[in-house]
Amino acid sequence: MSTITFVTGNANKLKEIVAILSDGSKSEDGSSKVGKFTIANKSLDLDELQGTIEEVTIHKAKSAAKLVNGPVLVEDTCLGFTAFNNLPGPYIKWFVQSVGLQGLVDMLYKFEDKGANAITTIGYCAGPDADVVLFEGITKGNIVDSRGPTNFGWDSVFEPEGYSQTYAEMDKVLKNSLSHRYKALVKLKEFLSSQ
């Protein structure tokens, strides 16, 4: 069984990804199984490249594959406001840290359009010097006043289209069945199953 290292230091992302990808079985070391692959976790301090989400993800995947010296998964999640032509995009983490959740909401106060795109791009790199394969998932929604727990990024200010709850208010099973991360992971799972 091949091991793929998912590179993240974010415990919440790891829980979501394992919940969505795994068949519920565990390896002897506690890592999760996905088909014939085992997903292990490692936190690495990778340089954050400035650029598009695709450029950022490819750079992270190639850097991680060299450090791990084997197959890796990396994930980059964006939140883009439609009024801002999908910015802050890959810089959302820094925006949340700088202006907070209320600051994100306030950025749109003069705009009628409160629409947003939650985007996850997952990069799979089979090893050092291998090409990176990208898997993208997008969920459309709106930026709303914060509702629900605020312990997972911007979940409490993002309300997916067709729902009256923010990601933070949703049951985790429901969120994991419709989120941007779920949509990207379904594509990844299909790819891994074909390997």
Image (tube, rainbow, N blue to C red):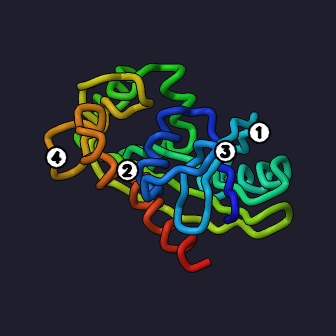
Task: Tell me which numbered mark, 4 or 2, is placed earlier along the sequence.
Answer: 2
For image coordinates 22% across by 40% down, the residue present is 112
For image coordinates 43% across by 53% down, the residue present is 24
Q: Are marks 2 and 3 in contact (CB under 8 Å)?
A: no
In the drawing, does residue 140 fall left or right of residue 20? left
Task: Tell me which numbered mark, 4 or 1, is placed earlier along the sequence.
Answer: 1
Task: Tell me which numbered mark, 4 or 3, is placed earlier along the sequence.
Answer: 3
Q: Amino acid at mark 3?
A: Val
Q: Position of residue 11 (x, y in %)?
A: 53, 32
For image coordinates 74% across by 66% down, the residue present is 126
> Which is more foreground, mark 2 or mark 3?
3
> Which is more foreground, mark 2 or mark 1?
1
Task: Tell me which numbered mark, 1 or 3, is placed earlier along the sequence.
Answer: 3
Q: Are marks 4 and 1 in contact (CB under 8 Å)?
A: no
Q: Secondary structure at mark 4?
A: loop
Vertical order, 1 against 95 (above or below): below
> Which is more foreground, mark 1 or mark 3?
3
The residue beneath circle 3 is: 7
> Which is more foreground, mark 4 or mark 2?
4
Q: Secondary structure at mark 1?
A: loop
* Disc 3 packing (10 Å; few <14; some 14–19; many ≥20): many
Asked whether 24 or 139 is in front, the reply is 24
* Disc 4 packing (10 Å; few <14; some 14–19; many ≥20): few
Q: Amino acid at mark 1?
A: Asp
**Could you tell me how far apart the alpha carbons at marks 2 and 1 are, in whole angstroms?**
25 Å
Task: Tell me which numbered mark, 2 or 1, is placed earlier along the sequence.
Answer: 1
Q: Amino acid at mark 4?
A: Tyr
